[in-house]
Amino acid sequence: MSVFEHSEFDAHEHVAFYSDPVTGLKAIIAIHNTNLGPSLGGCRMWPYLNSSEALTDVLRLSKGMTYKAAMANLQQGGGKAVIIGDPRKDKSEAFMQSMGRFVESLNGRYITAEDSGITVDDLKAVATQTSHVAGTSAQYNALGETPTGNPAPSTAYGVFVGLRQTVKHVLGSDLQGVKVAIQGMGHVGYRLAKQLHAEGAELYVADIFPEGLERAEQELGATVVAPEEILTLPVDVLAPCAMGSSINDESVPDIRAKIIAGAANNQLAREELGTVLHKKGICYAPDYVINAGGIIDIYHQKQADSSDQAMREHLAKIGDTLIEVYERAEAENAPTNLVANRIAEERFAKRG
């Protein structure tokens, strides 16, 4: 099957494959749409089972970045890179420098940044070979932490703002006593949990790695549950903050949360599941709207005259955008994901 016949291919402008036998690098870059500007998106490293799985991920993620940039009112297009491999053992400086040469070969049509499995130090190695890198340095931080270039604080703050606004819209309350199940206690999930804890939310957490779980249990009083149980808990909010497609045909029938609002990309295994959630009366915060904090962070880090406060104010608008989606969805009696898609497409479609 060619890329053009792939189920996730959506008129992508450019899909490039790269293999370096010297370093062992195998990577794919997908550019979805550049109508609003050069494509921007993180580089993810993951031990995909095969290249087909990696291609599916990069096609979906790059499309999501186009929609994310449009909904965040940024003059950027959507792109993404994936590296096939285990980030805990397969990386080296030469490996990441090779990735830099791959990015450079696209002549600025794709700007790379940090994503799962990639660190700021990795990006610095990439930057020795190309200038088309974002996130190697930082001036601002949404959570008052020391700026490092890692956009996780902004992503977490944006999800927190969006989740809080969604709870107010759906439940008519603040976060005090609201039960939230968080799938994934990584850089974003833990920061989200910390903010929710400060607002009085009752937390349930799960992850396949123990480090974040121990911190959440000890520092935030969170209840640790098994990964296979987190999606089905009788909670107010389910916050997927791990890999995508957790909302799928198998999990949806057992979801008991009233709201789904999390940081993960591509939470719906297929778009039609948005309709299923709508019919079940579950409010779904479209992932690329609520998790746009990372791309907003990258934008502000490039502005010499921005500030922590300016970035926080921009991130706070994620909540306003979600309300726009919810109100239009209610008026049209339509699934929130499809309404968000239409709004984004209205923004990035070529005119005339």
Image: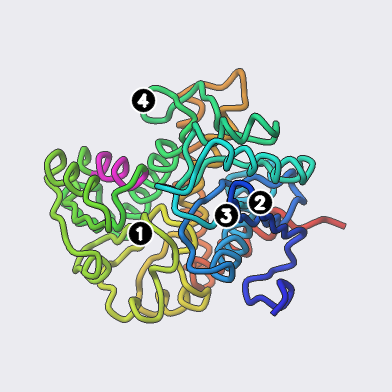
Q: Amino acid at mark 2?
A: Asp
Residue toward you, 202 or 224: 224
Mark nearer the viewer, 2 or 3: 2
Give the residue number, with chain letter if any, for mark 2. Answer: 20
Residue 174 can be seen in this image: yes
Mark nearer the viewer, 3 or 4: 3
Mark nearer the viewer, 2 or 1: 2
Q: Amino acid at mark 3?
A: Val
Segment tinted magenta in the rendering = 188-196
**Residue 251 falls in image quadrant:** bottom left
Q: Amino acid at mark 1?
A: Pro
Q: Is residue 193 magenta?
A: yes
Characterize the local packing of mark 4: few (<14), some (14-19) or many (20 or more) Cα atoms within 10 angstroms.
few
Mark nearer the viewer, 2 or 4: 2
| Mark 4 element type | loop
Characterize the local packing of mark 2: few (<14), some (14-19) or many (20 or more) Cα atoms within 10 angstroms.
few
